[in-house]
Amino acid sequence: VSLTWLLQNVNKDTLQAKFCVNREKESCRTPRNNDEVRQAWDFFYNVGDWFAGVGRYFTEKDRSIFQGRKVVEGQLRGKKYLYSIEGNGIFVPVLPIFDPTNTNDTMEMSDTSTSPLIRAEDVNRFLEKQYLTMSEEMKAVASHFSSQPFMAATEATIVLLAKHASSITTYWGESINHIEDMLCTQLYNAIGKNVTSNDLNDFVRYHNQKLFADSYAPEPFCYAIRRDGCFPDGAISIEEKTIGGGNGRDNKGNDNKHAMTFTRQLETSNGGYPIMHVPINSATYVQLTGDLFLHAWMLQQFQDKPSFQLVSRARQFSSFLLLI
């Protein structure tokens, strides 16, 4: 596992952490969605995965030894397995704590006198609590596994510390999610609802109708397929599939909205556009005539990538040919 990120965020002179989030970057969105926290997230994930692998190696090795046939039955009596080690008694000093009463005596890494960070002496108390509980657990594990013939106190201590290190990385990730959830909760309380991509699409649709004149405003891409002077044979449309739209337009609670396109009809009466011939097979071709339209489609992305589908529907006892 690489420790480069950790060493880069430690002051070599004072041995204090110098991690900070650059809020001036355009990529900084939220306490969790920024470059610095993403790098820290990758580091803690890799470290936690490495420690979990170390603990898993010893526990599986311990289990495989006593599953062999060459082990004397008397050695199994009173056997203590490494997978029984939990490490829950060790205090994890990673907690999302804010101290609103701390206005004067703040941590040295804080630049303002109103920082909600807890004081350095409180952090030292947390670390001292971690050290005391860790020492007690290590003594208990060493005493518990001292009489084991194969995996003894040394291996048991390694498994204990590996599980504790994994707990630290897990608590760190949960703390970051808790801070992010606090911000989301404040935003939800201010707006009164969770803003989704559907809300953004509705917002853009509404304001496009007010921004553009009627002759230039985007229109739903949904057209009837017909011959001159005849009843429509079907319809063609481009639909955006949104999950849980709320209008109940299908049996799964989805809401299919038509894509909004800018449409322009091209002039074809002066013969400026040649007639298109599309071969179907060696003896048959289709001649395309009629009105010619040009459609422009402008999309916006909020969170998830939108899903669109080209839908063609033919009426009963009718048919038409769709070329793509």
Image (spheres, grey):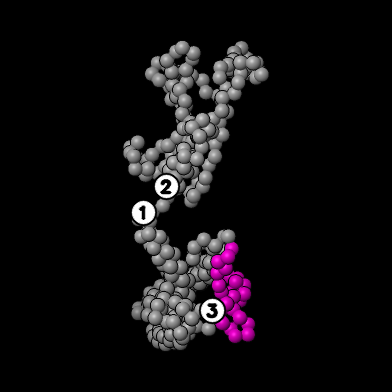
User: Which residues are the magenta region?
Assistant: 1-25
Which residue in the protein does label 1 denote? 193
Please tell me whether mark 3 sits on a helix, a strand or a loop: loop
Image disc number at residue 7: none
Please tell me whether mark 2 sits on a helix, a strand or a loop: helix
Q: Residue at x 35, y 78 (%)?
A: 77
Q: Which residue is drawn at 56% across and 19% down?
A: 291
Which residue in the protein does label 2 denote? 199
Which one is in front, 113 or 9?
113
Instruction: Please say if 67 is above or below 316.
Output: below
Q: Are marks 1 and 2 in contact (CB under 8 Å)?
A: yes
Magenta-highlighted stretch: main secondary structure? loop
Q: Is residue 130 visible?
A: no
Instruction: Please say if 216 is above or below 111.
Output: above
Crowding at dot 1, Cα within 10 Å, few <14 / some 14-19 / many 20+, comes out as few
Residue type at mark 2: give it.
Asp
Question: Can residue 192 be found in the magenta stretch?
Answer: no
Image disc number at residue 111: 3
Quarter of image, res 70: bottom left
Residue type at mark 3: give it.
Asp
